[in-house]
Amino acid sequence: MKFLVKKEDIFNGIRLVANVAAMKSLQPVLANILIETVNDNALRLTATDFDLTISTTVEAQIENEGKITLPAKKLNDIVSRLADKLITFELNNETNSVNIKCENAKFDIIGISASEFPNVLDINLVDENSIDIDIKPFTKAIKQASFAAANFETNNLLSGVVCDINENTLEMASTDGNRLARVRENISNLEKKSSQLIIPSKTTNEFLKMSALVNDQSVKIYTDKTKLILKTEKSMMISRIMEGQYPKYNQLIPKENPKVAVINKNKLVSALELVSIMVNEKTSIVKFEFTEDKLTLRGDTPDSGASEETLNVDYKNEDMIIAFNYKYVIEGLKNMDNDEVKIEMNTNLSPTVFRPNSDEDYISLIMPVQMR
Amino acid sequence: MKFLVKKEDIFNGIRLVANVAAMKSLQPVLANILIETVNDNALRLTATDFDLTISTTVEAQIENEGKITLPAKKLNDIVSRLADKLITFELNNETNSVNIKCENAKFDIIGISASEFPNVLDINLVDENSIDIDIKPFTKAIKQASFAAANFETNNLLSGVVCDINENTLEMASTDGNRLARVRENISNLEKKSSQLIIPSKTTNEFLKMSALVNDQSVKIYTDKTKLILKTEKSMMISRIMEGQYPKYNQLIPKENPKVAVINKNKLVSALELVSIMVNEKTSIVKFEFTEDKLTLRGDTPDSGASEETLNVDYKNEDMIIAFNYKYVIEGLKNMDNDEVKIEMNTNLSPTVFRPNSDEDYISLIMPVQMR
């Protein structure tokens, strides 16, 4: 194998796949990136941890075809520091060592034979079952809907993000039992196909990183029973799908909460960050005291002291005291684009909805904490 | 105690002293900052870990005099997040709790009585024994001369920085046995006093942070047998001095090394960073191969591969191979202002001098590593 490639091109490719290469794996080859020539003008980079595989095509001048796997971290370190010029890669088939040359710099990097790399790209893409979707709303929905997923062991369904694609809406949601995020987007570009899947949150996180590195307008979604494939022009993610029945979360969302406050989002975030200096680190509870057009936030700790801040808000209902884990509130607010947030409450024990004070269909639902 | 203070003023004061407050100490009061009113218009903030004490004066409107200690970290968190307005501090003497108010925010923070704070400011400043010195060259010398100090336990003399003040030169140096940094600065503003001291490197590090936060032109240095006092108009550091005989490091510096190479400093640093991707992490050895007007740097590892980069240099002596811990070389170079570095060598086992190719009197001396 011998090829010449622009530094920028291969560096982008490596960045796209390198996250998936598992640093600590029983199989050393999983810490490596598979590099293979595809045709005279392209090579493919692939990394996998079995649950998730990312592969991307990179433009290159291929002089001799071939394939090898190289350690992802070392390869990334080397390429990132090379000059912005043409880089030559040349494999010594006897030693599995690749010679990398760029200007006056030269590396010999020892790889592992490509035959040891798992055969993860052997999938069958059936175009009739695919859905084309605009990458922008899809990425936005993933970002807004995935932060509430549980941090449990990877086989718990609540650690996944549920994704419902219908005729012209995309609904995504996650919940860890204490809070829930749900977003609905209108999508065009859609053939009349529908699909529901539970995506591991590792996959949604990696997709967010990938979407920041590609220029594509749309992404093609393929599914079969056990796998989700997300494909752009040059790149592809193959992910395990989680199997099972995701909780019927839409039933948890109150149809109407009678008490409504409207607040400047950034001021609320700042006030929560200030007041939270004096909260119990284990419980993270901040009390929200609503009176007419005022919201007072209060924190207190057993040993260090107490805090409070008062904000002007739009609130006309009866006085109310309700307590939340402030971290959940902040996370929900930070995923909101709008400047104003609407808080919809019922009693101080019922699920409370935080949503943008706009048409956007995004909600962050949080269970209040019982006060003693 | 009650006072009003500008956020900016007290925040700068807290930043100046807070580093010294020990987070994990057997005495909880050492994690606190002592706040005391000095007169109608000023308060003093002090923190100490016994080895090092920093104190600073902050302008304020004092309404009632008094003193208290407050936890450094909480106080810093609170003040940093308050609006850029007047802040009111009011002590409740019965509870040792301080009420902090700023705009719509309010805190009650529980302190520890000032009577428990050690009496670290009780020192006798004798002006006749003091030396006035420009803060700029002093700070520069500290920065350039202190990085080579050993990371040993704090009582080892080599963990200190030796400081020699003579009629019109300041010499500072540190060495850990494998390398040495020495700088000489001409200083004006100097009465004809001289002094040699060994300063703990924690003190030099904190002085660098302090000098970045003060606006003073000069610093007054007071010493007695066991203490060093560095005083600017509003701030003061009191440090332990290390006692003992510092090694006669100037004898280690070769008078003349016959083989001389001149190299662009930034190119050498970049090349070392590139080549070091492929070095044994335990030994960090990079080989320097000098031939006529060329320097080839080489790294290699037992398992991952090898690296090399060739640089154009000015070198006319006989060919030479010499090896260094590349981290020492980079640290020495990064503390150099000049664009070009002069490397002065003798044999590949003799101490090698890296110095700016200019008049500046700074050297980084490094012992080569024996090659197998």
Image (cartoon, coloured by chain):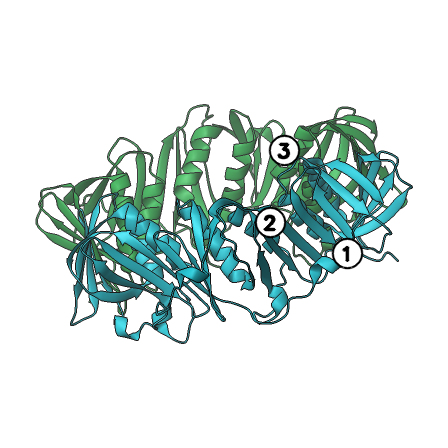
Chain colours: A cyan, B green
Residue that badge 1 annotates:
A367
For disc 2, the neighbor class at 10 Å (few under 14, some 14 to 19, many from 20) is many
As helix, strand or loop, the secondary structure at mark 2 comes to helix
Outermost residue to the front: A192
Q: How crowded is mark 1: few (under 14 residues within 10 Å), some or many (20 or more)?
A: some
Question: Which callout, 1 or 3, points to the residue nearer the camera?
Answer: 1
Residue at 62%, 60% (x, y): give it: A149
Instruction: Give the labeled residue for mark 2.
Output: A144
User: Label 2 marks which chain's residue?
Assistant: A
Q: Do labels 1 and 2 share a chain?
A: yes
Judging from the image, what secondary structure is the residue with disc 3 in? helix
Q: Disc 1 or 2, which lies upstream in sequence?
A: 2
Q: Are marks 1 and 3 on the same chain?
A: no
Can residue A181 be seen here? yes
Q: Which chain carries label 3?
A: B
**x, y percentage for residue B354?**
26, 44
Q: Residue at (27%, 34%) from the top-left corner?
A: B339
For the question of whether residue B249 can be seen, the reply is no
- Looking at the picture, tell me which residue is in the foreground, A240 or B361: A240
Q: Distance between the residues labelled 3 and 2?
A: 38 Å
Kind of residue sitting beneath label 1: Met
Left/right placement of residue A193 relative to residue B61 reads left
Which residue position is annotated with label 3?
B12
Label 3 neighbourhood size at 10 Å, few (<14), some (14-19), many (20+)? some
CB-based contact (under 8 Å), mark 1 and mark 3: no
Residue type, mark 3 in image: Asn
* Mark 1, secondary structure of its residue: loop
Image x and y of residue A161, in percent:
59, 60
Horizontally, is A240 left or right of B341 in the view? Answer: right
What's the amino acid at mark 2?
Gln
Residue at coordinates 30% horizontally, 55% vertically from top-left? A57
